[in-house]
């Protein structure tokens, strides 16, 4: 494993202006391009379901399909080999080269060969190898690696490209794009004509007839599989599909999702040896090409039998998960693994490369779940990453400070809360030392580009009893308030607003004092054992409250209580039942209030003097699927005029501990958010998540202090008389 | 000429093709930079081809598919009187890297995407369509299917082995600054003649 310093790499990328502007432009244009490409299909969801179903069937029959694919190809005259890893594949390929006296090889894009660094090996063996995809060729000349699976050179500009051209060709190539493309055509054409072997990957391999499908816009794969007398197919097991007609299930989604095209220029289907006409001993002859296929395992079969991780094989390598990823679109693909980038890349690296490599950059997934809304194969990428993190922790344990904090402090509510109170007195211990840095509420190193709220003098839990004097005398329902750490210790006034609004809709509100942190930071770090302890404490505390509903005004807490606890106890029948009963009572604050307001006809749209907009928290929007309710509440809030802003559902960059570990990167996401808020013209930005409130509030304070940030509870409370 | 199937038409007529898909096909093909020429018959294509040749200052052509179609064969013969037209597979193989225009055929179009399905089992068809800077293709205008799902249903029936696939516009790249540039490896122009009166 290469030991890398990801933070320094990220720092570099953040200062790469070319990369930054290329990615920013692309990520702005992508959603509309994708939507346009899908405009003529009846239901994207139906296509995604078809693909998912077909691919998950395929992976569960992977050996059978491999046998069938091999048999089909052999019957048609090809030779088929299987390689258990990169070494075995290289040996096999070299033997084929030696046997056929091969010297010059042209290649069309294959991620599998990148994965095993095949080109380096072949060149070491004295073979002349040329990538023929323009982007891949430029990168190979530059000694760089692709930063995206579909757009490998998206991080470069025309001047950099011209330099690579000039260096390679020893000519002065101007940075004129059509001229460079024509130059590439001229140079590569020579390579095609002299090549004695073509190596291709495969976007899919069809078991029933042995055909492979190759998807390109340039058409290089078509020439690679046509002109040289030998064709070697290098294909990962996961690319196999049962039938010819199954290919359409991939092809209706892959180009639309990948590049916003309804179809790529060339979808080539090659099956078995095909004729070639070439000069032999001074005479033109027609004969069949030699075709070899090598099925690459390299960890694939093991993952295919993993009940959780096998989901990753619903991937068709469209890379749309990168296109919508806030991290990728800020720092590009090279900070991830060496080959596969983005969230899907983290998973593939963990499965196909090594868990040590995975662990170095797995926390670059901030769990915002945008990728899950576009993935053609409906892969729950953040969940698979989390699963790998959990396994890593189960195997290797946590780092020492994390272990101490999670296992010794946070599970003991009294110690934990005493520490937080101490922090509020001095605000000093918080800012120094590694120890406190890992608390969910610590703010050291977060000062660049944003200000930080102080820990409140008096936490919510100490204010609660006074508030409950105002409970309605004849209550319609009994609500237990789960504050979560942020509303308890950082924004207790918002906690007060929550209570006021709930009382106003007729709820008797209580606050179970034994509640603790919901456990999300611990779950995120992969320490499920400790998380279960916290979950048990909370389940017990909340059960005792005997309430009709349990309300959280933090979507992350709501999600954890409602969904994650059930997953934590999936194998514990008794606690699972208790978690399920709890889950039924959990309500996210705005959704409960909106329902009551709707029932009591309090949702009349108003146009007040002050413009207000809304930011969707990732967990609220994509895990809880709550986004209409807060907007309806704001549209009806007296004194305000609701406007929508661009990129409302894009992550603000807080994302739990991510915002602290990668402070600089987090600030970049924040700046984009602040820009969009300003553009909307709103004087107030409303949120429904205290963590977003902390992050965006800090950014506004530094960059746009004239704009206010408020939790929806605060806005609603303004309109309720005491 | 060697083909994946000599019975495409038989399968296409099993309820897959319909004239009503033409407008979708036209819109999507043009969006993919296909230069679409609707003609009533082969004869009408002649003057247009001559204009293309003149405009491109072309003189040498590689032409495939004449063996399967008398009309096409007649076109090639007529063109052969004014230009150098290679129709023999060995001649095509030898000259494809240096000819100006390749002429070929497509089996059917796909409305959803503007793609054409090409049967390129023979080597000469592949080099004639990929190596020259211009590719002229003839297709029966009535042979358009609705979706890619339908297209693959047809392949499910006819594709046993060989070389086929779909072409959707000319060769393109956006690898430098995502600027769309045509003609990187294959043709920079794909000119499709959709012939109305084809059998």
Image (cartoon, coloured by chain):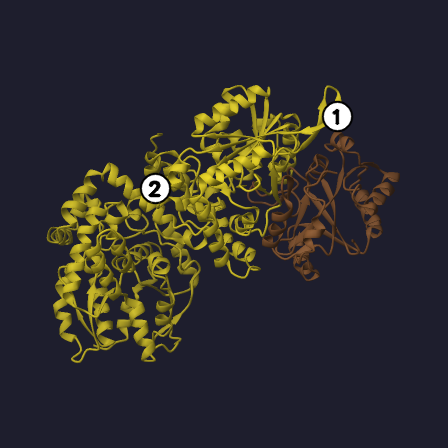
Check the picture and name the quadrant holding the C terminus of chain A. Answer: bottom left
* Above or below, A583 relative to B3: below
Q: Percent from the top left, x then y, of residue A299?
A: 40, 35
Q: Residues within 10 Å of mark 1 (few under 14, many from 20)?
A: some
Counting labels gives: 2
Q: Percent from the top left, x then y, of residue A678?
A: 41, 60
- Is residue B52 among the parts visible in the rendering? yes
* Residue for badge 2: A362
Residue placed most toward the observer, B142 or A374: B142
Q: Which chain is brown?
A: B
Check the picture and name the quadrant holding the N terminus of chain A. Answer: top left
Q: Which chain is yellow?
A: A
Q: Percent from the top left, x then y, of residue A391?
A: 28, 41
Q: Residues within 10 Å of mark 2 (few under 14, many from 20)?
A: many
Residue A284 tag number: 1
Residue A684 tag number: none
Instruction: Name the side, left or right, on which A620 lies relative to A147.
Output: left
Q: Residue at x 38, y 73 (%)?
A: A609
Q: Residue furthest right?
A: B81
Indicate the chain on which mark 1 is placed. Answer: A
Instruction: Name the side, left or right, on which A567 lies relative to A236.
Output: left
């Amino acid at each position: 494993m290469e030991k890398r310093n990801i933070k320094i790499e990220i720092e570099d990328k953040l200062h790469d202006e070319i990369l930054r502007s290329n990615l920013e432009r692309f990520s702005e244009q992508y959603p509309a391009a994708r939507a346009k490409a899908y405009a003529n299909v009846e239901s994207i969801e139906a296509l995604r379901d078809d693909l998912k179903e077909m691919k998950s069937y395929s992976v569960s029959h992977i050996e059978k399909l491999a046998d069938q694919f091999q048999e089909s190809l052999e019957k048609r005259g090809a030779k088929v080999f299987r390689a258990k890893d990169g070494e075995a594949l290289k040996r096999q390929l070299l033997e084929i080269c030696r046997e056929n006296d091969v010297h010059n090889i042209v290649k069309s894009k294959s991620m599998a060969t990148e994965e095993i660094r095949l080109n380096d090996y072949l060149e070491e063996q004295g073979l002349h190898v040329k990538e023929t995809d323009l982007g891949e060729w430029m990168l190979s000349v530059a000694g760089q690696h692709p930063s995206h699976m579909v757009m490998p050179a998206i991080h470069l500009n025309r001047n950099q490209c011209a330099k690579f051209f000039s260096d390679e060709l020893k000519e002065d190539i101007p940075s004129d794009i059509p001229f460079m493309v024509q130059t590439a055509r001229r140079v590569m054409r020579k390579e095609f004509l002299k090549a004695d072997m073509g190596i291709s990957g495969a976007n899919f391999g069809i078991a029933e007839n042995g055909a492979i499908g190759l998807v390109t816009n340039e058409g290089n794969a078509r020439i690679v599989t046509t002109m040289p007398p030998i064709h070697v197919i290098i294909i990962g097991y996961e690319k196999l599909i049962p039938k010819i007609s199954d290919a359409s299930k991939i092809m209706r989604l892959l180009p639309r999702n990948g590049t916003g095209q309804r179809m790529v220029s060339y979808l080539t289907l090659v099956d078995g040896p095909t004729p070639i006409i070439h000069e032999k001993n001074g005479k033109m002859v027609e004969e069949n090409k030699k075709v070899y296929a090598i099925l690459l395992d390299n960890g694939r079969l093991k993952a295919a039998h993993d009940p959780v991780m096998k989901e990753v094989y619903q991937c068709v390598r469209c890379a749309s998960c990168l296109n919508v990823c806030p991290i990728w679109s800020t720092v590009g693909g090279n900070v991830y693994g060496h080959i596969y980038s983005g969230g899907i890349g983290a998973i593939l690296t963990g499965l196909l490369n090594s868990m040590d490599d995975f662990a170095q950059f797995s926390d670059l997934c901030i769990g915002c779940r945008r990728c899950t809304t576009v993935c053609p194969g409906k892969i729950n990428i953040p969940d698979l990453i989390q699963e790998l993190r959990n396994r890593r922790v189960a195997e290797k344990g946590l780092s020492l400070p994390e272990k101490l904090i999670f296992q010794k402090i946070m599970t003991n509510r009294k110690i934990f809360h005493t520490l937080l109170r101490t922090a509020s007195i001095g605000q000093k211990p918080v800012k120094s030392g590694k120890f406190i840095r890992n608390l969910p509420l610590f703010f050291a190193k977060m000062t660049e580009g944003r200000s930080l709220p102080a820990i409140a003098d008096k936490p919510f839990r100490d204010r609660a009893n006074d508030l409950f004097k105002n409970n309605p005398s004849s209550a319609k329902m009994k609500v237990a308030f789960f504050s979560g750490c942020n509303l308890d210790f950082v924004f207790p006034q918002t906690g007060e607003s929550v209570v006021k609004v709930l009382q106003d809709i007729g709820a008797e509100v209580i606050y179970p004092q034994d509640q603790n942190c919901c456990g999300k930071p611990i779950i995120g770090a992969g320490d499920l054992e400790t998380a279960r302890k916290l979950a048990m404490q909370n389940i017990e505390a909340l059960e005792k409250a005997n309430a009709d509903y349990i309300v959280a005004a933090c979507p992350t807490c709501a999600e954890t209580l409602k969904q994650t606890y059930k997953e934590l106890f999936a194998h514990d029948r008794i606690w699972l039942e208790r978690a399920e009963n709890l889950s039924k009572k959990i309500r996210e604050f705005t959704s409960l209030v909106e329902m009551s307001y709707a029932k009591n006809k309090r949702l009349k749209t108003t146009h007040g003097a002050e413009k207000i907009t809304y930011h969707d928290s990732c967990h609220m929007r994509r895990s809880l699927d709550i986004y209409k309710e807060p907007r309806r509440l704001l549209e009806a809030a007296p004194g305000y005029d609701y406007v929508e802003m661009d990129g409302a559902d894009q992550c603000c960059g807080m994302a739990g501990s991510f915002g602290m570990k990668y402070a600089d990167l987090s600030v970049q996401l924040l700046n984009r958010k602040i820009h969009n808020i300003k553009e909307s013209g709103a004087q107030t930005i409303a949120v429904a998540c205290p963590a977003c409130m902390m992050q965006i509030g800090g950014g506004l304070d530094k960059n746009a202090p004239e704009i206010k940030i408020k939790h929806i509870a605060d806005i609603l409370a303004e309109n309720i008389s005491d | 000429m060697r083909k994946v199937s000599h019975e495409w038409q038989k399968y296409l007529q099993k309820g897959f093709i319909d004239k009503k898909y033409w407008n979708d096909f036209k819109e999507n093909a043009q969006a993919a930079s296909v230069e679409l020429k609707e003609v009533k018959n082969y004869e009408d294509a002649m003057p247009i081809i001559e204009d293309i040749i003149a405009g491109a200052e072309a003189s040498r052509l590689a032409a495939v598919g004449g063996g399967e179609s008398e009309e096409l064969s007649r076109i090639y013969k007529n063109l052969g009187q004014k230009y150098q037209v290679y129709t023999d597979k060995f001649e095509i193989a030898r000259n494809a890297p240096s000819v100006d225009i390749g002429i070929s055929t497509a089996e059917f179009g796909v409305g959803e995407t503007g793609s054409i399905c090409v049967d390129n089992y023979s080597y000469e068809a592949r080099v004639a369509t990929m190596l020259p800077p211009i590719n002229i293709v003839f297709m029966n205008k009535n042979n358009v299917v609705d979706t890619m799902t339908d297209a693959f249903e047809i392949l499910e029936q006819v594709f046993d082995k060989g070389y086929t696939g779909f072409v959707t516009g000319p060769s393109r790249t956006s690898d430098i600054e995502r600027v769309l540039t045509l003609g990187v490896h294959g043709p920079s122009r794909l000119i499709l003649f959709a012939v109305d009166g084809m059998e």
